[in-house]
Image (spheres, rainbow, N blue to C red):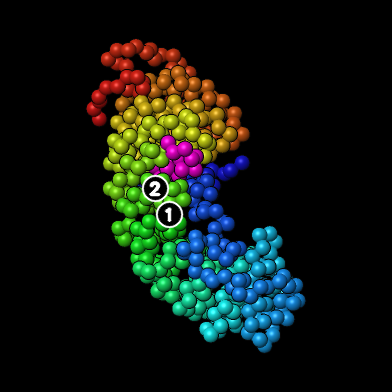
Amino acid sequence: MPTKNVTDKRLSKFKNHGKDPAKLRDKRISECVELRKANKDDSFLKRRNITLSSLPDEDALSPDYTTNHMVTTLSIEEIAEAVNSHSREVQTRGCQAARKLLSQERNPPLKDIIDAGLLSRFVDFLSLDDEPALQFEAAWALTNVASGTSWHTQQVVENGAVPAFIGLLASPLLHVSEQAVWALGNIAGDGPVYRDILIDCHVIPALLARIRPDTPVGYLRNLTWTMSNLCRNKKPCPPLSAVLQILPSLIQLLHHTDKDILSDACWAISYLSDGDNDRIDVVVKTGIVSRLVELMRHKELGVLTPALRSIGNVVSGSDLQTQAAVDAGVLEVLPPLMRHPKASVQKEAAWALSNIAAGPCKQIQQLITCGLLPPLVEQLRNGDFKTQREAVWVVNNFTSGGTVEQVVTLVQSGALEAVVHLLTSKDAKVILVILDAVNNMFLAAEKLGETEKLSLLVEELGGLDRIELLQSHDNELVYQAAHQLMEKYFSDGDVEEVKVEQTEEAFLFNPDVQRTFEF
């Protein structure tokens, strides 16, 4: 059973929760771990080169040496003998045989190649500018070793591959240079330690030098992917100096037309904006927010998703940063995303909306004006549970910071009925957030002198029975919250005394009755 301190700490991490002035700018950290971390499929962190080129023929950069040197399958021992020979031609055939083994779809013998002591030889070959075929085959083999586990990547790094690959980026032969880009992307994708080692070795200027107007699209795809891996990971985040170096080129790439380049550039921005408000500010000040909002309309899910994630990070920052996204039109884009056929998009959109709802009443009003309440209620009623969980936070944040009139509007939209039905959830945290939101609604009703009428509405919606049952919940915090609501707003006799008549005195919280009122 969680303690009160643990839950209070978790709740305090939600932006503007309770409007505590000291925490008004706190970044919301979602309970849903896969939502808050940059959850691009881990298989994209490292890439193993299986075919000669995954690009269309017209974009292929890598010459097919197999047409010139027919290589039969060699054993690890025979490969080692060839690689350690004194003949460049034999060494090239040995490296090619090794990269073929390492390019197997299933269970490539990474450890066998390492145990044979071949990595240091492969690294040595990277510096042989007069032997481009040998350079290329050695680079390809090392790229595939680095695509393995952290231990495999460690062996590549410890054999001196990092400076060798960075030097190879300047090769005049695009297929050789591209293989170095690929290898460095695998090393950067291993985690923050190797990411920072690469940054310290000045990999960013060397990569940026390869972005030119005539850079082939296929090469540019690999460059963008490698740069996105350099932006990835927290604890620690990438150094700000590196972020400032890489951002201008990322912004340039965000205006490309290729969907793969756009996707990886958006993921890079999402990583860079997934931090404290200072880091979000660096991204916002580039002026790229409008482009990200535009990309939230992209037809490709691979572009839309990271663009939405980036904007979700921005609106989890300060109210000024959130307003930058609002001014860029995010509230016009969110309604269709709340109704997107993909549940994952609905969830991300609801998460972004929850942070906008955590802002000042001006932003909450813009949320209402842009028609976000109907899709919100739809998700509360019919969304999958992960989306419903985010939508519940929208309601909670809305009721925490909205004006009395705005809370009335929320109740009239059907949100109260929807969250009351979610009180049967098996997730204690969701129940606590709902009970807190209902309590906020009662606080608004108190200002209107209509608590008894709201109590009756809650009862008519089935909420009283559900709250009553929660007093026997296994979670002590749920029990306490439910008990306090019952004691304060549903004490014996209160509900029965209220008579409902469709007259001028009809209560404001009836969704079917609307009237103006004064503060």
Q: Residue at 49%, 74% (x, y): give it.
A: 177
Q: Residue at 60%, 83% (x, y): give it.
A: 124
Secondary-structure class at tag 2: loop
Residue 18 position by quadrant: top left
Residue 469 position by quadrant: top right
Q: Against 316, is 60 above or below?
A: below
Question: Which amino acid, mark 1?
Answer: Lys
Which residues fall within the magenta stretch?
339-354
Check residue 298 in the rendering and tell me which mark sits there, or answer none: 2
Q: Residue at 57%, 44% (x, y): give it.
A: 3
- Asked whether the beta carbons under mark 2 and mark 1 sit within 8 Å of each other, the answer is yes
Residue at the outermost bottom position: 86
Badge 1 crowding class, 10 Å Cα cut-off, few under 14, some 14 to 19, many 20 or more, is some
> Visible in this render: residue 188?
no
Check residue 500 in the rendering and tell me which mark sits there, or answer none: none
Q: Residue at 67%, 77% (x, y): give it.
A: 94
For the stretch drawn in magenta, what is the main secondary structure? helix
Relative depth, front residue between 370 and 142: 142
Residue 420 locus on image (x, y percent): 48, 27
Badge 2 crowding class, 10 Å Cα cut-off, few under 14, some 14 to 19, many 20 or more, is some
Residue 132 locus on image (x, y percent): 54, 80
Question: Which amino acid, mark 2?
Answer: His
Q: Against 76, is 447 above or below?
A: above
> Visible in this render: residue 330?
yes
Q: Quadrant of the N terminus?
A: top right
Residue 55 locus on image (x, y percent): 50, 61
Residue 498 locus on image (x, y percent): 39, 15
Disc 1 designates what residue?
259
Instruction: State yes or no: residue 343 in magenta.
Output: yes
Left or right: 198, with 145 as reference point: left
> Which is nearer the N-term, disc 2 or disc 1?
1
